[in-house]
Image (spheres, grey):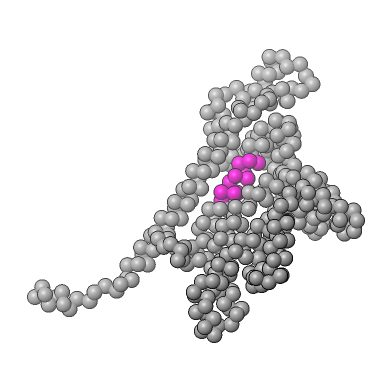
Amino acid sequence: MAQSNLATATPPAPGATKPPRQAGAALKLAAGKIGAFLFTVFVSSVIVFFSRWLVPGDPISFLLRGRSPNPEAIAEVTAIYGLDKPPLEQYWNWITGVLQGDFGRSLQYRQDVTDVILNRLPVTLGLVVMAGAMIAILGLAAGIAAALLRGTWADRAIVASMSGLAAIPSFVGAIVLIAVFAVQLGMFPSFGSGTGFWDMVYHLVLPSLALALSFIAVVGRVTRSAMVEQFAREHVEVARSRGITPVAVVIRHVLRNATGPILTVSGLLVAGLLVSSAIVEQAFGLAGLGSLLVSSVDRLDFPVVQAIVLIVVTAFVAINTLVDLLGPVIDPRLKAGEGAR
């Protein structure tokens, strides 16, 4: 009887338990990435806050500049800014305030740090977004063109041009763009961020291009390399032999599979954009977060420096975490539990 039941029992389908396992592995991977993100931000906040004890200079001296630093004035200022409390208590008060959107009070502007940053944020955000759009459009276009024309003189010219752009620092690119397009041709302004949305866009064209130049070259070279590697894969030859149109082969089988390395590099470039924006903002006289960070470091405005650095680190880690989570969605070969083949 037992043998009959065993013989007539329907065996489970080979892949019946695979989707739940895959879903569980994907959730575990996502939870791990998010946990790593939170831990990294926490460690960064500790380093950012306590690093001010390693910086030479005293914020009290800056606050009392031009006045006699008598003990009563020093005690009053330290009490107002909470500098008389133990370091761990200062950190706890600061991080709990940060979680509520309160970064403290600026020593330089005598305002809430949040208000100071929000006044500068539109310029930097517009600069980074425009530069990112230029990088995506021009970098992908150059890389795709070079890959499609691989081995030709056009391919070599594009690669040489991208190598040249990659070697140009942002401040050099800014000077050249100002000299050519602002001074010689008069096509774009060379100073300020303008008033109103469209005027700001017009003013940010040259700064965005100066910020994006070297990154366009990086994305272009990575795109070309990834696509050339995919062109040599067997599945591309199979797709061609089946009569699939060249455009469909490039889009569905080459570019899609090459998206992983491109997306990974693009995530890493975010930190470069945020850091390089300070140089470009100084060159074009833009009142953004980069120029605010430079002036705050110079004047020992620790609350503003800590807030900007923490925001930059959080944005960088968040974008790279998002890239890691989107990778398996874009490229099925990278699903949880599977290696790239």
- Regarding residue 206, the answer to whether it shows in the image is yes
Vertical placement of 190 versus 295: above or below?
below
At 63% from the left and 53% from the top, the residue drawn is 269
| Magenta region includes residue 316 | yes
At 41% from the left and 55% from the top, the residue drawn is 28
Q: Nearer the viewer, residue 328 or 112?
A: 328
Picture quadrant of residue 151: bottom right
Q: Nearer the viewer, residue 249 or 18?
A: 249
Picture quadrant of residue 250: bottom right
Image quarter where the N terminus lies is: bottom left
| Magenta region includes residue 116 | no
Q: Nearer the viewer, residue 201 or 274?
A: 274
In the picture as drawn, the residue positioned furthest to the top comes out as 71
In the picture as drawn, the residue positioned furthest to the left comes out as 1
Vertical placement of 225 versus 215: above or below?
below
* Image side of residue 43 versus residue 65, left or right: left
Q: Position of residue 116 (x, y in %)?
A: 71, 40
Q: Position of residue 43 (x, y in %)?
A: 52, 39
At 70% from the left and 34% from the top, the residue drawn is 297
Residues in magenta?
Answer: 308-318
Task: Examine the residues drawn in magenta and state their main secondary structure.
Answer: helix
Picture quadrant of residue 197: bottom right
